[in-house]
Image: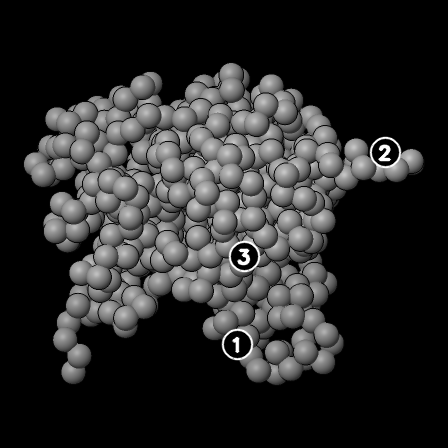
Amino acid sequence: MNSEQKAARDLEPCVVGVDFGTLSGRAVVVRVRDGAELGTAEHAYRHAVLDGALPDGTRLPPDWALQVPSDYIDVLRTAVPEALTRAGVRPEQVIGIGTDFTACTVLPVLADGTPLCELPEYAARPHAYVKLWRHHAAQGQADRINALAAERKEPWLERYGGKISSEWEFAKALQVLEEDPEVYRRTERWVEAADWIVWRLCGTYVRNACTAGYKGQYQDGSYPSSGYLAALNPDFASFVVDKLDHPIGRLGDAAGRLTAEAAAWTGLPEGVTVCVGNVDAHVTAPAAAAVEPGQMVAIMGTSTCHVMSSDQHGVVPGMCGVVDGGILPGLWGYEAGQSGVGDIFAWFIRSGLPAEYAEQAAALGRDPHEHLTALAAGQRVGEHGLIALDWHSGNRSVLVDHDLSGVVVGLTLSTRPEDVYRALLEATAFGTRTIIDAFEAAGVPVDELIIAGGLTKNALLMQIYADVTRRPLGVIGSAQGPALGAAMHAAVAAGAYADIQSAARSMGKAERGVYRPDPGRAAAYDRLYAEYRLLHDYFGRGTNEVMHRLRRLRAEASAAPSS
């Protein structure tokens, strides 16, 4: 390679993708030509998740999960410049920046985008903060939304499998109205964080089609009617008109150009193309080169989101939504999910790992997850004698009920930590199979499962999923799937590719069939799965309301004055 060729290579166009997750934000610099990831950086949110108290010490009730929006700006200030430095890429090589966010993560702001929590008079008001996706304290509002929609036979309800989640936009907004009317009145825009961060980058507020469709009940060009909203609460009638409705931006379109302020944060040139926002799970599908019907991508981290495009339109019970072009143009985009997966494993390590196990892991140079996985891997299917329900953070699909809770059946005095850990791994696989079965029963075939996210590193977990679902498992070829997908959409917005399918063919990456089901283990798991479904329906479909009764008792005890 001569000097001219090397100079041309060194100046190849690049894009930046920024993935805003639950605990941190990650930036990746990607070469447009082939999707090569040249440099990455991560920045942990200073305030993490506020689930016990606000920064000033104001206590939060159970099931709350808030964030501080300035933490997101800190990601732009730190992770993006650091990724550029690590990539050895000149700022002028970057032709676009794309972002993705957890969803539904939503915040109340003024008309200029100022978050209410940044106003001194609202610093101690919980409803003025970002409501993270896993804020589940609006379950009562979600129940009323669903009951009224079913009673009125609202046509949009079936697009969400018959139930709206407490995680979505309307339930969270209704909770604000009913619990802090002053904050609700002061809210001039009810904004998805995915759109707020784009607003901060380019100065233009555009509602992205993905969150509008899946989290905002925007179907066939409209939201739920004012008459329906008024029946929920008279003061909610004008919510869409006053606080929500805004121009919708297509995925992969340009939202605007990088402002001087954002250029100073990121180290990128002013005027660089800023892509319309997107959701972390949905943007990962093209990053995993899953652009054909029937290819389901499970993005596995603290929770799992299942996304898939299909040429078949079906009503899948408990799905999080089906949106025309919601993931890829020209196909129906489906979403389902599990509210707790990695969070459940982390909970067990945090609360159930004996000191002697932690000492053993340290002596062997393993972290606790690696240690329990190694111990559990030697077991035969069913050897631990346990079955668990993966509802420690409620159930997103197919029951759509965040007042449900976790269960472990079969505990004895000889049960070991690795037994429970493996049962929890298996429970999350059974939850995914329940989702797949619901799709298949609705006439929406699932031909292949591709896994993305940090949990792909656990080979035992991946093999369990292959055996339980009886499907070959592919694995995304990137450790930063959402950020890569955001960068790919930025390449489309900047004009480097005609559409996201074209970008996926050049920039996406996945290895197919890495894990294949073993017939013997799969047959044994069929028997365990049958037991899981018995428990699933017994506790989740109204046969036994003990979980809901316990939740009410906890709420009453939490509200009572301390003795």
Q: Check the picture and name the quadrant holding the C terminus.
A: bottom left
Q: Secondary structure at mark 2?
A: helix
Q: Which one is in front in this view, the residue at disc 2 or the one at disc 1?
A: 2
Q: Residues within 10 Å of mark 2 (few under 14, many from 20)?
A: few
In the image shown, does 392 or 249 lie closer to the viewer? 249
Q: To which residue does mark 3 refer?
A: 78
Kind of element beneath mark 3 = helix
Q: Are marks 3 and 1 in contact (CB under 8 Å)?
A: no
Residue 456 appearing in the image: no
Residue at figure coordinates x 26%, y 47% from the top left: 108
Q: Nearer the viewer, residue 171 or 41?
A: 41
Looking at the image, which residue sits at the far right? Answer: 1
The amino acid beneath tag 3 is Thr
Structural distance between the alpha carbons of marks 3 and 1: 50 Å
**How would you rate the neighbour count of disc 3 (Cα within 10 Å): few for under 14, some for 14-19, many for 20 or more?**
some
Residue kind at label 1, given as amino acid type: Leu
Q: Earlier in the sequence, mark 3 or mark 1?
A: 3
In-image side of 366 versus 198 (left or right): right
- Badge number at residue 4: 2
- Using the image as rendered, state which of residue 353 and residue 86 is in the foreground: 86
The residue located at (63%, 51%) in the rendering is 83
**Coordinates of residue 377 in the picture (x, y in percent):** 70, 61
Q: Give the residue type that dot 2 points to.
A: Glu
Q: CA distance from mark 2 to mark 1?
A: 72 Å
Q: Nearer the viewer, residue 139 or 430?
A: 139
**In the picture shown, does residue 2 fall above or below 459?**
above
Q: Is residue 12 above or below residue 135?
A: above
- Residue carrying label 1: 413
